[in-house]
Image (cartoon, helix red, strand yellow):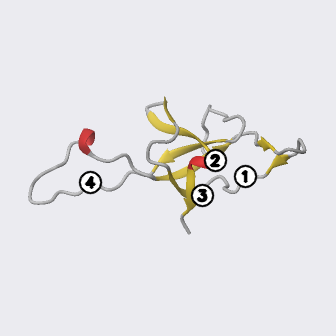
């Protein structure tokens, strides 16, 4: 696990986006502002969990280190030590990349 000073709570998951390599086509570089937000991310930290109807914590379906696909507009972006992270609910995670 990365040494990150953010500990998610509840069913939130802290992820770090995996940046796609910049491609130049025909000599044109696309500026960052025009690129789509990447949907592939790496799980950095897990929250405390979500309680079910019986009051017991449900285990997360992802684990630290998993590569996941997240909802394009889901979560809240945060900056820490010049790195960008996103806090998403586990429901915003669409799948785990094998």
Above or below, 4 relative to 64:
above
Q: Name the residue under label 2.
A: 90
Q: What element carries label 1?
A: loop
| Coordinates of residue 8 in the picture (x, y in percent) | 66, 35
Callouts 2 and 3 close, C-beta under 8 Å: no
Find the distance from the CA under tag 1 to the CA under tag 2. 8 Å
How many labels were placed on the picture? 4
| Mark toward the start of the polypeptide (1 vs 4) | 4
Do callouts 1 and 4 mark residues in contact (Cβ within 8 Å)? Answer: no
Q: Which residue of the protein is positioned furthest toward the front in this rendering? A: 53
Estimate the spatial distance between the alpha carbons at disc 4 and disc 2, rounded to whole Å: 29 Å
Instruction: From the top left corner, tell me how far across and down residue 57 is, in percent.
Output: 83, 45
Q: Residue 71 at x, y = what percent?
A: 49, 49
How far apart are labels 1 and 4 at the CA level?
Answer: 33 Å
Residue at the spot of label 1: 60
The local crowd at label 1, few if under 14, some if 14 to 19, many if 20 or more residues have their Cα within 10 Å, is some
Label 2 or label 3, whichever lies nearer to me, is 2
**Marks 1 & 2, CB-CB < 8 Å contact:** yes
Residue identified by numbered label 3 = 66
Of labels 4 and 2, earlier in sequence is 4
- Disc assigned to residue 20: none
Contact (Cβ within 8 Å) of mark 3 with mark 4: no
Q: Residues within 10 Å of mark 4 (few under 14, many from 20)?
A: few
Tell me the crowding category of disc 2: few under 14, some 14 to 19, or many 20 or more residues within 10 angstroms, Cα based.
Answer: many
Circle 4 is placed at which residue position? 22
Q: Is residue 82 left or right of residue 94?
A: left
Identified at 67% across, 55% down, the residue is 63
Specify whether residue 19 is in view: yes
Q: How far apart are marks 3 and 4 (CA)?
A: 23 Å
Q: Relative to residue 88, is residue 95 depicted above or below?
A: below
Q: Quadrant of the C terminus?
A: bottom right
Work out whether mark 3 precedes mark 4 in sequence or the reverse, and give the earlier one. Answer: 4
């Amino acid at each position: 696990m990365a040494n990150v000073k953010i500990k998610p709570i509840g069913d939130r998951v802290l992820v770090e986006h995996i940046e796609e390599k910049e491609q130049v086509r025909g000599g044109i570089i696309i500026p960052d502002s025009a690129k789509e937000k990447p949907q592939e991310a790496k799980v950095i930290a897990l929250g405390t969990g979500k309680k079910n109807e019986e009051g017991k914590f449900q285990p997360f379906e992802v684990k630290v280190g998993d590569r996941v696909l997240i909802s394009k507009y889901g979560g809240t972006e945060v900056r820490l030590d010049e790195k960008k992270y996103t806090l998403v609910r586990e429901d915003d995670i669409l799948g785990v990349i094998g």
